[in-house]
Image (tube, rainbow, N blue to C red):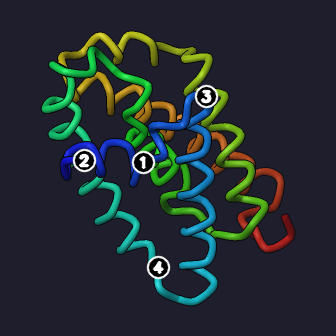
Amino acid sequence: MTLHKIIATVFGIGYIPKGGGTVAAIAFCVLFYFGVQYHCVSQTGLIVFTLATFIIGVYVSNKLEAGWGKDSKKIVIDEVLGMAVSLLFLPINLTIIIMGLVLFRIFDIWKPLYIRRTEKLKGGWGVMTDDLVAGIYSNIILQVIIYFYTGGNAEIL
């Protein structure tokens, strides 16, 4: 297996016949949660990770499109990107992570509010951008929930 395939499939998760995207998103959530708990992850680190994931994801998706076809189900690095974006600039606890996962998967699967249009971008841009936008929508909803429901104090969630 080439490095492009390892990255695009997130260490082989993309080869799972059904639900690979959900498994990749959950794997990110688990690793992120423990990274936060053990003080190995910061918001700055998440920002850098998110930017790098987007750039690398576009690149590897472009490389694999010729052999795997447009937006192959094997490519799940886009779900990792979407989950990372969903959790940017939020106080992190288990409830926020689970809410982010649910919202992101809803937006990613249903593709409302112009998300589907972003898939039409060429190559890796289309692969990565629809999940980027789904993550942005999820993040906005989480920000609103935290602000209005908790008065900005996510610790009570």
Instruction: Find residue 136 and report its horizontal and vertical position in percent.
Output: 48, 39
Circles 1 and 2: CB distance less than 8 Å?
yes
Give the amino acid type for the residue marked by disc 1 in the picture: Gly
User: Residue farthest to the front?
Assistant: 1
Mark 3–mark 2 CB contact (< 8 Å): no
Task: Give me the C-alpha separation between circle 4 and circle 1.
Answer: 24 Å
Q: Which residue is mark 1?
A: 12
Which label number is shown at residue 1?
2
Query: Is 96 displayed left or right of 140 in the figure?
Result: right
Question: How far apart in space, not on screen, are marks 1 and 2 (Cα)?
Answer: 9 Å
Q: Are marks 2 and 4 in contact (CB under 8 Å)?
A: no
Q: Amino acid at mark 4?
A: Val
Q: Gap in Å between the C-alphas at discs 2 and 4?
A: 29 Å
Q: Is residue 65 left or right of residue 98?
A: left
Residue linked to disc 4: 41
Residue 122 relative to residue 115: left or right? left
